[in-house]
Image: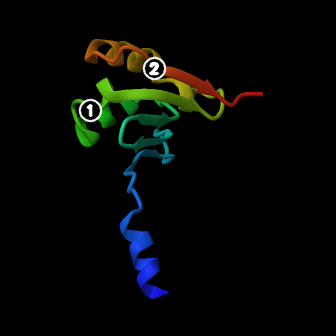
Amino acid sequence: MLKTFDHYLSKQKIFPLSVIGNGAPGCSKSLYLHTDHNRYLFNCGETSQKVITEYVGSNSLSQLTNIFVTSKTWNNIGGLPGMCLSIRGAGSPDVRYHSYIT
């Protein structure tokens, strides 16, 4: 049984998750998720664009495919205008915007 479990673990994929903002004063709560073919951003605060290009990678914006917003507050959407311009400038053809706002 242990051999089967080890075999299962060796086939699992690892998806890096980068914390862009931790919610400290003056900082939004944002996450950046990498998968094999897509990149996902959860919440886009004012400094998200700068942090992604500096710490995650310079070509990360060109591979961003989806932006999820969890609430309609300035901390979560303040960086969207600049992010959209940077994504388009980096060469990403389309980015989907998803919001869970009731």
Q: Is residue 50 left or right of residue 66?
A: left
| Mark number displayed over residue 53 | 1
**How many discs appear?**
2
Nearer to us: label 2 or label 1? 2
What's the residue type where badge 1 is placed?
A: Thr
Q: Nearer the viewer, residue 8 or 33?
A: 8
Image location (x, y in percent) of residue 65: 43, 27
Image location (x, y in percent) of residue 79: 45, 24
Residue plotted at (57% across, 26% down): 74
Residue plotted at (50% across, 23% down): 78
Q: Nearer the viewer, residue 73 or 31?
A: 31
What's the residue type where badge 2 is placed?
A: Val
* Residue count near mark 2 (Cα–Cα under 10 Å), binned few <14, some 14–19, many ≥20: some
Tell me the quadrant of the picture where the C terminus can be found: top right
* Residue count near mark 1 (Cα–Cα under 10 Å), binned few <14, some 14–19, many ≥20: some
Q: Nearer the viewer, residue 77 or 87?
A: 87
Q: Is residue 102 left or right of residue 87?
A: right
Callout 2 secondary element: loop
Image location (x, y in percent) of residue 5: 46, 78
